[in-house]
Amino acid sequence: MTNEYYNFDDQDNFNLEAAKLTLNHDPDPIGAHADIIFGRTNTFLHCSSCDQTLNYIEQAYISVKPPKAKGFELDGGQFTTSAGQEVVETMNNWSYSHGLLFSYAIPYYHFGIRTSMPLSKVWTAGVQVVNGWNNVTASNGGVTVGITSSLVKPKYTWNANYYTGPENGGLPPQYAGTQKGYRNLFDTTLLLTPNAKFNAYINYDYGQNRIPAYPEQEYNGEGYTTVTIKSMDPHWQGIATSAREQVTANAAIVFRYEYFYDNQGFATGTNYSGDYYYQTTYNKLNIEECTATYEYKWVAGLLVRVEYRIDWSNKKLFNYGNDVNYGSGTPTKDAQNTATVGLIAFFGPKR
């Protein structure tokens, strides 16, 4: 069975979320980085129709950091997105399961170039030019541009990211390679670090995919006629907040709450029926989740996380347990409760 609206650890049985090998050489002035990953994570990172040779690559890029460029760095290749608070690697997140914003509001990775430049002792900014969302090659008719900003203070960190480009989402295949269908994403996170034992964050995302009106051939029983598919403006937004308390030297507790709104079911894929671009029915969707996590560090590099999570929605999205309709493709419940025990192991140089 499957835990609905989970990514990476969605199977409710003993399962390998990810095994990862990292190779890294810091730029001095040239470096390289590669993350090779195996497990359930690949199902979500790479679509089934993508080039299968990419399915074990999370990141692979070359870095250049000129010694006299005052900290400027340029990376070229495939790299994970700058948007969001959570990342692909579970060990670097506070909770074991990935949240709704990570799963539906933002991309996983990009292919292209990115830059970063310290503008002051506390502020770093950058520009990215990439081939859209979650792909290496694309026929979008143009590139996606990202602007990143990170302000790091002793008691807080504020990150902001903006991506815009012709992603062509919602358009039929014959419109690939055009400048239509712009997608915009604004992402910001405020991370609070008041002391060594307590941390908290607030993450907000707003996304929009413009779908202009376009002509389409439709069969009317006697022949084909040209009809105009009306323009649409699907958008989504969400907020996540989480707090982490280090209760002992080896134990920590985490609480996370998220709210996600998808006005036409575009981001979550809940509005599709028949041809994927006939999005004519509005499907205002609200999803919320609350997660409690207990973490215990046995030894250096070995973590155990025990987690309880509740997901609920304004629509019947969940289909699990012993429902007679399970597997029929018709969700029957508006809430889902899950319990998870996760083991995380890290082997490598001491940090």
Image (cartoon, rainbow, N blue to C red):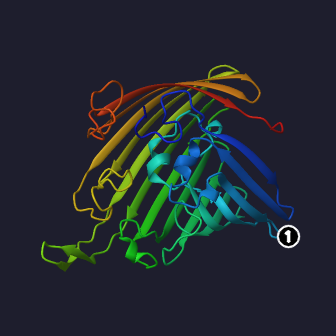
The tally of labels here is 1
Please provide percent x and percent y for residue 228.
22, 76
Residue 37 or residue 292, whichever sits in front: 37
Asked where in the image residue 125 lies, by quadrant, the reply is: bottom right
Indicate left or right for 3 with 25 as reference: left
Please provide percent x and percent y for residue 58.
65, 52
Indicate left or right for 264 with 96 as reference: left
Residue under numbered circle 1: 68
Outermost residue to the front: 222
**In the image, what residue type sits under mark 1?**
Lys
The structure residue drawn at horizontal position 57% and vertical position 69%, both measured from the top left corner, is 137
The quadrant in which the C terminus is found is: top right
Residue 212 or residue 195, whichever sits in front: 212
Asked where in the image residue 112 lies, by quadrant, the reply is: bottom right
The quadrant in which the N terminus is found is: top left
Q: Is residue 80 visible?
A: no
Indicate left or right for 107 with 347 as reference: left
Asked where in the image residue 108 lies, by quadrant, the reply is: bottom right
Please provide percent x and percent y for residue 50.
54, 60
Q: Is residue 251 visible?
A: yes
Residue 80 drawn above or below residue 138: above
Crowd rating for badge 1 (residues with CA inside 10 Å; few <14, some 14–19, many 20+) = few
Residue 187 or residue 273, whichever sits in front: 273
Please provide percent x and percent y for residue 64.
79, 67
Residue 324 drawn above or below residue 221: above
Q: SS class of the residue under badge 1?
A: loop
Indicate left or right for 232 with 251 as reference: left
The structure residue drawn at horizontal position 53% and vertical position 70%, both measured from the top left corner, is 138
